[in-house]
Image (tube, rainbow, N blue to C red):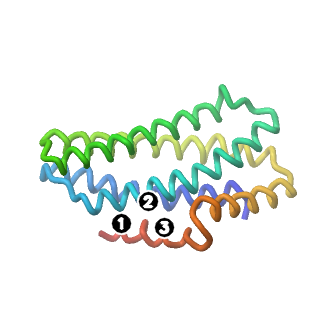
Amino acid sequence: MKPTDVLVHEHEIILKVLEAAEREVTFIDETGKLREQRIGQMMYFIRNFADRCHHAKEEKRLFVFMHERGMSLDGGPIAVMLHDHEAGREFVLGMVNGLEMARAGNAEAVKTVKDNLAGYIQLLRMHIHKENNILFPMAAKMMTPEDEVRLIAEFEQVETEEMGAGVHEKYHRLAHELMEQ
């Protein structure tokens, strides 16, 4: 498996959670209520799997590799991806703050959570499309077989450092559970 294949596979898992999140946005629209535990599980997945693991592989390894091969970090595709990662983190922070306000009895907080969840979904769908169809093919063309082996090993190192050994599968199971609910 190539490094970009690993990232595309992780995108497929993230997209499963985004489908579940879309259903949650619909539920909020229809009922005006938050299912705090479910949204909490989604945020847990997003913060840990999507950001701490997946985005860390991109930011700490793939983007660095591409920069070493001459691609700018300050402009062009990598800069756009980094901006998207930051925008995603802002949406997550909005969800966290919204949930806290909802627990404190703020009636407007339901809308805050819904709007940030919907914004995150839209952002990530476009982001994944850009990476899968533009950035990753560019990266794959830059890689030698030796680069591929090294990046796969570095991805595994990021996983272990960021999440711990063997934790990756836990998030796969959570994504499937969220899809089935």
The residues bearing labels 1 and 3 have C-alpha atoms spaced at a distance of 10 Å
181 on left or right of 6: left
> Residue at coordinates 64% horizontally, 65% vertically from top-left?
160
- Helix, strand or loop for disc 1: helix
The residues bearing labels 2 and 3 have C-alpha atoms spaced at a distance of 7 Å
Point out residue 162 in the picture as x, y percentages from the top left corner.
Answer: 59, 59
> Residue at coordinates 38% horizontally, 42% vertically from top-left?
93
Is there a contact, CB below 8 Å, between mark 1 and mark 2?
yes
Where, quadrant-wise, is the N terminus in this rendering? bottom right
Label 1 vs 2, first from the N-terminus? 2
Mark number for residue 45?
Answer: 2
Callout 3 crowding tier (Cα within 10 Å): few <14, some 14–19, many ≥20: some
The residue lying furthest to the top in this view is 75
Query: Looking at numbered disc 1 in the image, what kind of residue is underneath it?
Result: Leu
Query: Closest to the observer: 105 or 151?
Result: 105
Between disc 1 and disc 3, the foreground one is: 3
81 on left or right of 109: right
| Among the 4 quarters of the image, the one containing residue 133 | top right
Query: Looking at numbered disc 2 in the image, what kind of residue is underneath it?
Result: Phe
Callout 1 crowding tier (Cα within 10 Å): few <14, some 14–19, many ≥20: some
Between disc 1 and disc 2, the foreground one is: 2
- Helix, strand or loop for disc 3: helix
Q: Which residue is mark 1?
A: 178
Label 1 vs 3, first from the N-terminus? 3
Where, quadrant-wise, is the C terminus in this rendering? bottom left
Is there a contact, CB below 8 Å, between mark 2 and mark 3?
yes
> Residue at coordinates 44% horizontally, 54% vertically from top-left?
46
Q: Which residue is mark 3?
A: 171
